[in-house]
């Protein structure tokens, strides 16, 4: 058995570790350091640098501790004369042709080669000839600099590209003394995860181009924080100096990121210094623009909203938050609107998702212990990149089967044991089909057939599910229609009813804190912790007081409709940009202009903020501290690192609350709000400053209401093609603008359509096309392939300027595609 | 543009039948390419990668490990002159210099008419026939200046 | 002289099936197929046959190490023959391909293997073509394919060409190369017998080793074991090259004095020069001085003399040669052939070559001989695979036995510098 304990001695210390542990790791557990270069836990043993030689009794030759499994009764010595001579010898070989440019090397201060030489090396070199000279400081990509002279050929980076990324994009060329790392034909090494090689390179061969010569590593102030770009919430370290962010590094947390971060995490921070950041809190509610202090701003906004709520009723005010706020910000905003203004007009999303499904929520590590992972409408590579790495790992090396059910083919297909493609817009039918198949009703194949999936295939999938003991369903709620959400609930219930299977779901929305936003009740029909208004009024009043509103509120899209009708008078938008992100196009601007009061609280100036009467500065990531809940339900602390004179968001909102209720608590720090969340929000009672400190803590599954499953059938669209908007990691938006270091990753606008439709419409691969619907018009280049079924068109959202949302309707939209 | 010709395609079909794992066909396909083109271009590597489901970088990485694959075009006659120990003991250095002079090129170069390329080679497993050279697929042993003249002059 | 492998090697047409059969070829299969596979393994064990590729590991024992009950299994015949000085496999492959096929069938039957590969070095394109022809003949005659000779046993054998890399003769690098990877050696354990080709149990044997098996099965292991010495059984093909009058491959009974091989079989030293040194087993083994020329040519005696039998390549050096020049040439070879995976070998071979170059050019300072020795010590048994140890063999043995040759260069340099 893998976990069987083995006892051995290392330098006379007795060590007991699980079978299969490498001697180098066993030594670590008793504080013995065996030096390494090529060994890296996540990459596995390789044995090429020879730095870790040790003596083992009864072995004729010295052994490399990084490749040697512990054995019962083994006697290992790491400090004999022989070992020391070997270490000095290996270091001498390693340094033989390594330049001595430590004084100007960015790795200085955190360089394993420097450290090992200091601890284990000989005081001088005997190399009397010229060192080999090689290319210095050449771009390996726009963001990574390669210094070939410093490379010690440990193959960490190339093994990373092979084993972890599974791209084999960075490889070893040539052989022997001439070997060198490189890409195909010297093309840039620009994968989505390329930056991790900087962190794992044990010398200064691979460095962060932006960080070069910016600071000595020991002069940096490092703060342990989280990435704020997607719902995985990877852990990272932010290095700052003189209040400037200089670099991001990964900070391994196996429960979340498995040790890696994507390139957006590492380099997607230029927005911190963007010229589009909000300048100051200001208002023009009473005439001209005037600047406001935080306190003035809070009181001003709170009173304006209160006045309108008093005059026109609480239904005339509303709040649109975002999946990018922290739990504290989201919690306080819903509290302001519910307890302060008496309104349930609170929402954060445009898709009709539900706050949970009648099934357990799985965390990211459950993926590794599942025997089947079913991906539904999810494209992790673009939506949640580090999740993709974990899925590749388990599918390739972890013995987990992967089933992929989607309306567009994705990079995950090649790892799938089973994959099936349904028609764009037919997710509801497919879920219904699979549920029927699992329930044994016999209707499955027929239903699936109508959704464009082979009837037999769905049977195979059902068998795969039935043959599993633990199933994790990963779905992206964003592209799913209301009907699909309903059927998905039904499917999960059907899976839960199969005797032996334990299953759970991961709602894999791309938004950073999408789960937190649901948990914090930033929803018109749910209170924090998933307490439903429907049928739950009593419980809600028991928890939140008699005066708390219990009439269902308006969704974000409904609020905009009501604004158009003149019935919604005041709207506060936190960190959302409906004009760019909501379906509906030009109508939206007209609706927002009709409001008496539009307050936008955001980091950046956006199309929406330009319409506002009051703008409030949000500091956002980098500055403000707060917790977020990742797609696996893990609550972690996102620390700040940069200082600002602006009030943090939580403070501004709490001042608004106090403007309306002077008895409301005054929090000394964001953790004050966290403590209140722990007290008030079901599922969050275990969350505390202490409990989330190291690896975060999963919140417990909020009790999920087995809501009635409505299943309005999806509208068949006449003519045209159904539009599927695909998410892109490196889309050009307010956060990643053209001045970003990652702009080389931006893509052109494309439209993927099936060969059948293309030939009917006279479109050839590569043709420029125009896509139109509801007055909107988008240009793209056609990609004709079978990556999408007939009847659908997939258009990735590559840029805000693409104006893609002008085509979208709340449920999948019908569009016309024509050759331009 | 790179494309395999008919002979190569037939060969490839046979090769793919030999292995349970397609990647095993990588060296054989590189060999087929080189026999067709006399060298291996990046385009050919992309094509090989496509057929075997390997990244072009990986194909290049493997190809560059092995010295028999040429990324630059070599002459119609590739002369590999063994300079390893048994041939050294039998005077190969002088013979190699003789050959270079005869062809009017430096070691490592190709004649301007692209007829001959002359390379130093490590032991070719014909030590009992030292000094020796290999021209394309043929081994020539017990070389002398006269014999070298005869061999090279006989090549079309 | 007992001739097992070479008894009919120069017979016209031996490479064709009818002639080969006429010589009793493929007859051993009838004997083997009447036995249980395990019995065949026992016969090879009993014969005392040891690997002829270099390490001299007992063949039967290797076959018995295959991971139990794991299938499919593979046989890889090592026809990489890249060790400088060695060219005996080439002669077998060129002239008697069916002998290898027969040996591979026996091994496969004994080890329950259904697929075999012959890994040729890339430069053996011509031999691979000859082998393809022989394999076709064997297939057509039913020696390969399904249900061979009604035994119920299936086997096919394929050829595979490398492309210029000495290291691919090392068995695990060979496997990588056969799997379409860079020819870097693999970590051991797991050993190929447990996880070899495609991570399945795999037997790897040298051409000559496998070619011995038909005779052992036909004539009986006892007869084989009766040839040679106590621990070195049978005959060995020796490639004699260098400063001899009649270079060539000779089949000798193990234990034959080296002097007989050099002076009787190979006709003695060219121009009747004086023997200075000999490398008994290919460039990777230590060289020995002329005084040791009476050492019996077998595994144990050569080891006791401070060298190894290796691949059986006897490289003869006469008194006109300075050992440093030969060592420098070999170091250039090892530098060229180091795969570059591990640090001591990648860096060490180049460093040694640089120092040797400077010695020869009269440019060295300090005490280069001690430095060479110390660098060799830092490489010795510390590299990833045995190539690193092979690379230092000529240096360490050269300094040990022919220090004067080094000093000659150093002295010349000193006087040159003084003058
Ligand atoms: C650097 C190196 C090169 C080798 N080259 C060859 C070779 O060319 N041919 C060969 O048969 N064995 C070679 N070997 C030995 C093989 O690793 C392996 O031991 C042998 O093929 C096993 O077959 P055997 O037991 O029949 O000798 C080499 C070993 C090393 C370390
Ligand atoms: S670049 Fe760094 S990680 Fe890559 S092989 Fe060189 S030393 Fe190792
Ligand atoms: S760390 Fe063990 S060989 Fe590199």
Image (tube, coloured by chain):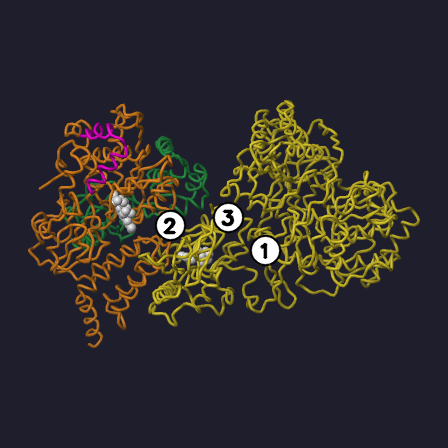
Report the mark closest to the observer, 3 or 2. 2
Residue A322 rendering spot, x and y as whole percentages: 73, 49
Q: Which chain is yellow?
A: A
Disc 1: host chain: A
Judge left or right: residue A19 versus residue A381. left
Residue at the spot 74% in from the left edge and 55% down from the top edge: A328
Q: Quadrant of the C terminus of chain A?
A: top right
**Marks 3 and 2 in Cβ contact (< 8 Å):** no
**Marks 3 and 1 in Cβ contact (< 8 Å):** no
Have a look at marks 3 and 1 and say if they share a chain.
yes
Q: Residues within 10 Å of mark 1 (few under 14, many from 20)?
A: many
Stretch of the chain drawn in magenta: C25-48
- Colour in which the image shows chain C: orange
Task: Say what secondary structure mark 2 lies in.
Answer: loop
Task: Say what secondary structure mark 1 lies in.
Answer: helix
Q: Which chain is green?
A: B
Task: Say what secondary structure mark 3 lies in.
Answer: helix
* Residue matched to label 1: A266
Judge left or right: residue C377 versus residue A675. left
């Amino acid at each position: 058995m893998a976990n069987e304990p083995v006892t051995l001695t290392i330098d006379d210390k007795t060590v007991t570790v699980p079978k299969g542990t490498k001697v180098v790791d066993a030594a670590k557990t008793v504080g013995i350091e065996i030096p390494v270069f090529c060994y890296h836990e996540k990459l596995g043993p390789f044995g090429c640098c020879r730095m870790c030689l040790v003596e083992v009794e009864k072995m004729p030759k010295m052994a490399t501790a990084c490749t040697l499994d512990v054995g019962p009764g083994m006697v290992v010595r790491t400090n004999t004369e022989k070992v020391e001579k070997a270490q000095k010898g290996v270091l001498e070989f390693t340094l033989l042709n390594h330049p001595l440019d430590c004084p100007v090397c960015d790795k200085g201060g955190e360089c394993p080669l420097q450290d090992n030489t200091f601890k284990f090396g000989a005081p001088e070199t005997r190399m009397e000839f010229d060192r080999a000279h090689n290319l210095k400081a050449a771009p390996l990509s726009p963001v990574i600099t390669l210094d070939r002279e410093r490379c010690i050929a440990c193959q960490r980076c190339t093994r990373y590209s092979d084993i972890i990324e599974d791209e084999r994009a960075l490889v070893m060329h040539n052989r022997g003394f001439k070997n060198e790392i490189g890409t195909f034909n010297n093309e840039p090494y620009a994968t989505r995860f390329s930056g991790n090689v900087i962190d794992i390179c044990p010398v200064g061969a691979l460095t962060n181009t932006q960080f070069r010569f910016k600071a000595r590593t020991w002069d940096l102030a490092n703060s342990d924080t989280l990435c704020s770009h997607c719902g995985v919430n990877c852990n990272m370290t932010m290095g700052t100096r003189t209040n400037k962010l200089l670099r991001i590094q990964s900070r391994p947390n196996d429960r979340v990121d498995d040790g890696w971060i994507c390139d957006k995490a590492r380099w997607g921070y230029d927005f911190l210094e963007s010229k589009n950041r909000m300048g100051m809190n200001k208002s023009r509610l009473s005439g001209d623009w005037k600047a406001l202090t935080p306190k003035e701003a809070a009181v001003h906004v709170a009173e304006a909203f209160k006045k309108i709520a008093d005059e026109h009723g609480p239904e005339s005010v509303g709040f649109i938050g975002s999946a990018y706020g922290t739990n504290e910000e989201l919690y306080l905003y819903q509290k302001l609107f519910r307890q302060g203004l008496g309104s349930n007009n609170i929402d954060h999303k445009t898709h009709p998702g539900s706050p949970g499904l009648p099934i357990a929520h799985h965390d990211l590590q459950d993926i590794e212990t599942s025997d089947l992972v079913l991906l539904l409408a999810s494209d992790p590579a673009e939506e949640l990149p580090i999740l993709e790495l974990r899925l590749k790992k388990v599918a390739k090396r972890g013995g987990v089967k992967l089933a992929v059910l989607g309306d567009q083919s994705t990079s995950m297909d090649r790892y799938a044991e089973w994959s099936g493609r349904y028609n764009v817009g037919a997710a509801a039918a497919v879920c219904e089909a699979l549920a029927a198949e699992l329930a044994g009703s016999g209707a499955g194949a027929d239903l699936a057939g109508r959704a464009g999936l082979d009837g037999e295939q769905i049977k195979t999938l059902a068998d795969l599910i039935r043959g599993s003991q633990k199933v994790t369903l990963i779905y992206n709620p964003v592209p799913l229609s209301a009907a699909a959400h309903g059927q998905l609930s039904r499917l999960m219930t059907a899976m839960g009813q199969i005797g032996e299977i334990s299953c759970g779901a991961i709602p894999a929305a791309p938004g950073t804190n999408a789960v937190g936003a649901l948990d914090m009740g930033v929803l018109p029909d749910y209170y924090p912790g998933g307490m439903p208004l429907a049928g739950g009024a009593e419980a809600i009043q028991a928890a939140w007081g008699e005066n708390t509103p219990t009439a269902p509120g308006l969704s974000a899209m409904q609020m905009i409709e009501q604004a158009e009708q003149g019935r919604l008078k005041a709207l506060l938008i936190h960190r959302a940009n409906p004009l760019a992100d909501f379906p509906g196009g030009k109508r939206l601007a007209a609706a927002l202009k009709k409001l008496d009061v539009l307050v936008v609280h955001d980091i950046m100036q956006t199309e929406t903020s330009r319409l506002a009467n009051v703008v409030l500065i949000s500091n956002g990531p980098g500055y403000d501290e707060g917790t977020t809940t990742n797609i696996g339900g893990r609550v972690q602390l996102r620390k700040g690192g940069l200082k600002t004179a602006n009030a943090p968001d939580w403070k501004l909102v709490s001042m608004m609350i106090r403007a309306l209720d002077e008895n409301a608590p005054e929090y000394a720090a964001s953790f004050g709000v966290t403590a209140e969340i722990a007290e008030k929000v079901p599922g969050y009672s275990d969350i505390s400053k202490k409990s989330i400190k190291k690896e975060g803590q999963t919140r417990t599954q909020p009790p999920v209401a087995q809501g009635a499953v409505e299943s309005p059938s999806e509208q068949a669209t006449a003519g045209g093609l159904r539009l599927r908007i695909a998410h892109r990691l490196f889309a050009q938006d307010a956060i990643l603008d053209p001045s970003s270091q990652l702009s080389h990753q931006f893509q052109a606008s494309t439209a993927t359509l099936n060969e059948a439709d293309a030939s009917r419409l006279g479109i050839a691969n590569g043709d420029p096309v125009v896509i139109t619907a509801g007055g909107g018009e988008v240009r793209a280049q056609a990609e004709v392939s079978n990556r999408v079924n007939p009847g659908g068109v997939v258009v990735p959202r590559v840029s805000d300027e693409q104006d893609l949302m002008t085509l979208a309707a709340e449920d999948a939209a019908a569009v016309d595609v024509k050759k331009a | 543009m790179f494309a395999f010709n008919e002979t190569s395609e037939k060969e490839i079909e046979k090769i793919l039948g030999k292995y349970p794992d397609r990647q095993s066909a990588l060296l054989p396909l590189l060999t087929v390419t080189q026999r067709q083109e006399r060298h291996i271009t990046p385009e050919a590597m992309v094509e090989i990668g496509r057929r075997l489901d390997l990244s072009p970088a990986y194909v290049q990485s493997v190809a560059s490990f092995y010295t028999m694959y040429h990324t630059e075009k070599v002459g119609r006659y590739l002369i590999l002159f063994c300079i390893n120990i048994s041939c050294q003991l039998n005077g190969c250095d002088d013979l190699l210099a003789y050959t270079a002079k005869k062809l009017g090129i430096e070691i490592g170069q190709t004649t301007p008419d692209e007829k001959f390329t002359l390379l130093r080679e490590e032991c070719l497993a014909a030590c009992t026939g030292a000094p020796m050279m290999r021209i394309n697929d043929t081994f020539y042993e017990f070389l002398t200046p006269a014999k070298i003249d005869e061999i090279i002059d006989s090549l079309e | 002289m007992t001739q097992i492998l070479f008894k009919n090697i120069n017979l016209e047409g031996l490479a064709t099936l009818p002639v080969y059969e006429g010589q009793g070829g493929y007859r051993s299969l009838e004997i083997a197929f009447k036995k249980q596979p395990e019995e065949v393994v026992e016969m090879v064990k009993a014969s005392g046959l040891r690997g002829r590729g270099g390490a001299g590991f007992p063949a039967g024992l290797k076959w018995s190490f295959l991971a139990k009950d794991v299938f499919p299994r593979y046989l890889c015949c090592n026809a990489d023959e890249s060790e400088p000085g060695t060219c005996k496999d080439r002669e077998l492959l060129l002239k008697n391909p069916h002998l290898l096929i027969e040996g591979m069938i026996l091994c496969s039957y004994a080890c329950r293997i259904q697929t075999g590969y012959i890994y040729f070095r890339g430069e053996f394109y011509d031999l691979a073509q000859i082998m393809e022809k022989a394999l076709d003949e064997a297939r057509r005659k039913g020696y390969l394919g399904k249900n061979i000779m009604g035994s119920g046993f299936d086997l096919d054998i394929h050829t595979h060409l490398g492309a210029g890399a000495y290291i691919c003769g090392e068995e695990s690098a060979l496997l990588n190369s056969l799997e379409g990877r860079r020819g870097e050696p693999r970590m051991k354990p797991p050993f190929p017998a447990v996880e070899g080709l495609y991570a399945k149990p795999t037997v790897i044997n040298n051409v000559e080793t496998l070619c011995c098996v038909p005779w052992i099965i036909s004539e009986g292991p006892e007869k084989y074991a009766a040839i040679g010495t106590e621990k070195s059984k049978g005959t060995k093909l020796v490639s004699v090259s260098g400063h001899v009058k009649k270079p060539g491959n000779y089949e000798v009974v193990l234990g034959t004095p080296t002097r007989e091989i050099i002076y009787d079989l190979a006709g003695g030293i060219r121009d009747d020069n004086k023997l200075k040194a000999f490398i008994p087993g290919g460039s990777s083994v230590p060289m020995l001085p002329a005084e040791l020329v009476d050492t019996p040519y077998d595994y144990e005696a050569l080891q006791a003399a401070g060298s190894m039998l290796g691949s059986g390549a006897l490289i003869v050096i006469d008194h006109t040669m300075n050992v440093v020049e030969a060592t420098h040439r070999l170091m250039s070879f090892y530098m060229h052939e180091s795969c570059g995976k591990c640090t001591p070998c990648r860096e060490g071979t180049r460093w040694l070559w640089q120092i040797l170059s400077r010695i020869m050019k009269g440019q060295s300072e300090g005490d280069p001989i001690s430095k060479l020795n110390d660098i060799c010590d830092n490489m010795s048994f510390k590299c990833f695979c045995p190539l690193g140890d092979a690379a230092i063999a000529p240096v360490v043995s050269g300094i040990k036995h022919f220090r004067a040759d080094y000093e000659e260069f150093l002295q010349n340099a000193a006087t040159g510098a003084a003058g």
